[in-house]
Amino acid sequence: MKMSYIVAIDGPAGAGKGTITKLVAKDMGLVSIDTGMLYRCHALAVLKNNISITNEKEVVDILEKIDIDLRNNDNKQLVFLNGEDVTNQIRTPEVSSIVSQTSTFPKVREKITQLERKIGYKWLKEGKNIIMEGRDITTVVFPDAKVKIYLDATPIERAKRRCRQNKKNGINQSFEEVLQSIMARDKNDMNKAVGALKKAPDAIYVDSSKSSVNKTKHKIIRIIKQKTNEGKRSVRNDNYKKNIKSNR
Ligand code: DC
């Protein structure tokens, strides 16, 4: 029987993980899981409940009182907070400005890591292959994933992309503001005590700065095919070697 596999992708804000992951999932029939949505949903709950982001106890405790649910609708992922669809609300600059801090607390990361694994295993049990993207998927959540990728781009390129995305979503922010916020988030994301953004030693580094979305997508599809066919190829090679021996 064919085993289901996990593709884990990490990288900084605006590197194209979201776009690329969805496109690769669509082309290859994988279930795509954007884990930033879980951290954003928790940050939204912090805002809605007027909790100060420096109050670690309340920021952590709110997770016990809320229900976060990710649903896949066609190729679109939706997130529900206590039954309410908050897919658009989690993308506001207010949420973006606090999420890299609310996601710093180790107890928050512990809970959301558990949720990510639960979501991942649920799909694997159903026989689906998954592609999960975030900051610590290759290092903490699924360090044994079959395919591990670190997707990167320069801060200027990432700020340009985020500006275009904001424009589409009706969010008004200057290029300078976006660049500053990206650099601040990089700093927070890379310096967390637990779950810091870093390249796993065995992750494949892909720089998307100078590549079109299509080119990056194909590059990642090639990597996935190569890695997931490895098992098949080595079994075939083993059988081939055995056959040679027994026919001598
Ligand atoms: O991918 P994103 O920009 O939507 O993620 C929002 C924030 O969530 C980001 O600043 C860092 C945090 N995050 C995290 O700490 N770990 C993850 N696996 C995913 C996101």
Image (cartoon, grey):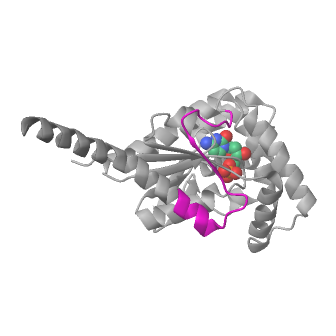
Image location (x, y in percent) of residue 182: 81, 50
x, y percentage for residue 31?
A: 44, 57
Left or right, residue 232 beside residue 20: left
| Residue furthest left in the image | 247
Residue 232: x percent and y percent? 28, 47
User: Is residue 3 part of the magenta span, yes or no?
Assistant: no
Quadrant the C terminus occupies: top left
Give the residue at x 78% y 37%. Answer: 188
Q: Nearer the viewer, residue 247 or 15?
A: 247
Tell me if 85 is positioned left or right of 222 in this view: right
Q: Is residue 124 left or right of residue 93?
A: left
Q: Of 69 and 232, which appears nearest the observer?
A: 232
Image vertical order of residue 127 relative to residue 57, above or below: below
Q: Residue at x 58, y 32 (%)?
A: 201
The residue located at (54%, 59%) in the rendering is: 219
The magenta stretch is: 196-219
Magenta span contains residue 204: yes
Displayed-image quarter of ligand 1: top right
Closer-to-camera residue (188/44): 188
Q: Position of residue 160 (x, y in %)?
A: 81, 63
Corner quadrant of residue 211: bottom right
